Amino acid sequence: LPVRSEPASAGYGCVPGCSLLFSNYAVRRDSLKMAQILTNIYDWYRDLMDNQSDPRVADWPMMSSPFPTLGLCIFYAYFSKSLAPKLMEKRKPMDLRNTLVIYNLFQTIFSTWIFYEYLQSGWGGRYSFRCQPVDYSDNPLALRMARTCWWYYVSKFTEFFDTLFFILRKKTQHVSTLHVIHHGCMPFSVWMGMKFAPGGHSTFFAMLNSFVHIVMYFYYMVAALGPKYQKYIWWKKYLTAFQMAQFVAIFTHQFQLLFTECDYPKGFMVWIGLHGIMFLFLFSDFYKQAYNKRVGRAKREAEALLAKSHANGKLHNGDIVNNNQGACMWH
């Protein structure tokens, strides 16, 4: 009998049980490929964590792995948009005025201290606004900058309480998608900078953001004190524009490195710059929507007033004749 030179295949020249044999072989081959892919991913991850990161911060709290930070960010989003609103659905809003005053005072002081530390550890004169490489040495100022970056990272978690207090007061209209994205993305983004480049060019955004938060939390604190203090925060209408100017300054400062040589990780420059652009567009859209709502509300109120005037009197050449014997009104 002639002998085939090619391997037998299932369904052609295959003895009973051959199909199962080849099926098991294919499954095993695919399993080995998947195992190799997973091994490569794990090796890449370990190399990234152990060899590419800053060894000075390896043993600092929350710095050994990205997963605790990532997990907290995911839980924050779930808690803010799903769990917490359900828990508060049948509960009355809480009166947290005193709590809010204390919290916003704490955040104002905390942000002021972080801003001061950024100035003292580099941005007060030693750092260059054009190009600032990361100092990975054990120089006291370099370590001070790294510690400041870590505290800035911690501050991104304390800001989660902004959302919690909105929910407890049942002001869920303030827990917008923009709000959750902004607060939910920041801890993980700052973690990456802290892990791989705790210092240098991109810390400009953290310093500037800390200054903005001094202003914002001071405003929130005064607003929480009650109506009689509102006259001191007449400048609140400029806050959104102030935040948007921050994002313009951030991406402008980052993207200047596209046009100059600088010994700073380009990946972080692009990452922070894109964050600035993303938040600029998100805040711009929010500002437009808020403005349109105000205009629409004012228009509806004017139409309602006009309708009421028509109901209570007659219009004659611009005058309202009041049938209720009251004083006439000029329309």
Image (cartoon, grey):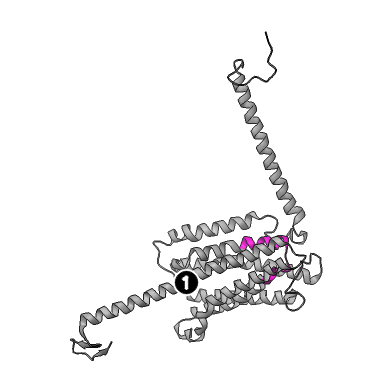
Note whether 5 is above or below 39 in the view shown: above
Q: Which residue is pictured at 68% across the width and 72% down the height?
A: 204
Q: Quadrant of residue 26?
A: top right
**Stretch of the chain drawn in magenta:** 187-204
Dot 1 falls on a residue whose secondary structure is helix
Q: Position of residue 163 (x, y in %)?
A: 51, 66
Picture quarter with the N terminus: top right
- Horizontal side of residue 282 vs 119, given as left or right: left
Q: Quadrant of residue 118?
A: bottom right
Q: Which residue is mark 1?
A: 288
Examine the structure image and report whether residue 190 is included in the region drawn in magenta. yes
Q: Which residue is pictured at 59% across the width and 55% down the height?
A: 71
The secondary structure that most of the magenta stretch takes on is helix
- Horizontal side of residue 72 vs 264, given as left or right: left
Can residue 235 be seen in the rendering of this structure? Answer: yes
Q: Nearer the viewer, residue 200 or 170?
A: 200
Picture quarter with the C terminus: bottom left
Q: Which residue is pictured at 38% across the width and 74% down the height?
A: 296
Note whether 133 is above or below 78 in the view shown: below
